[in-house]
Image (spheres, helix red, strand yellow):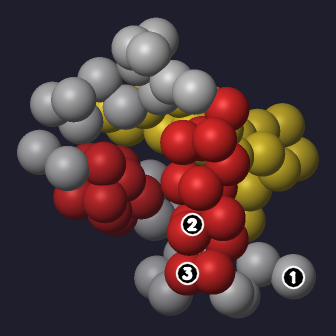
Amino acid sequence: MSIQQSLAQTLADRKGFGSSTPETIVCTDENGIACELDLTGVDSMSCAFRELRLILPTKDRSFDSLSQWGSELSKRVTYLL
């Protein structure tokens, strides 16, 4: 299962959650990439969180490849201002 699918299912299961104390959820994919999210609220259309962490496997990752990957990701994520 992809991280996107896992995250969508996890958020759907927590619909109606709301707290000032965050709940950490972890979603992983078959490549060992993990997404950790500190949730504070989930409703039918969105979620609120304090922190999002993306953890990559510790394979050979050069600074240039990580920089390029981060740059490409930041171009796609335009709604988090």
Residue at 67% of width from left, 48% of height from top?
Answer: 67
* N-terminal label among 1 and 2: 2
Look at the picture and state if 73 lies above or below 51: below
**Left/right of residue 71 with respect to residue 14 in the rendered view:** right
Please name the residue shown 31% across and 59% down the image. 4
Q: Residues within 10 Å of mark 3 (few under 14, many from 20)?
A: few
Amino acid carrying label 3: it is Arg
Comparing 65 with 1, the one in front is 65
Residue 27's disc is none
x, y (%) of residue 59?
A: 39, 14
- Marks 2 and 3 close (CB-CB < 8 Å): yes
Decide which of 42, 80 is in the foreground and name it.
80
| Whether label 3 touches label 1, CB < 8 Å | no
- Label 2, label 3: how far apart the Cα atoms are: 5 Å
As drawn, the label of residue 73 is 2
Of residue 29 and residue 57, the one placed in the foreground of this image is 57
Nearest the eye: 21 or 64: 64
Disc 3 and disc 1: Cα gap in Å?
13 Å
Q: Is residue 30 left or right of residue 58?
A: left
Instruction: Give the labeled residue for mark 1.
Output: 81
Mark 1 vs mark 2, CA separation in Å: 14 Å
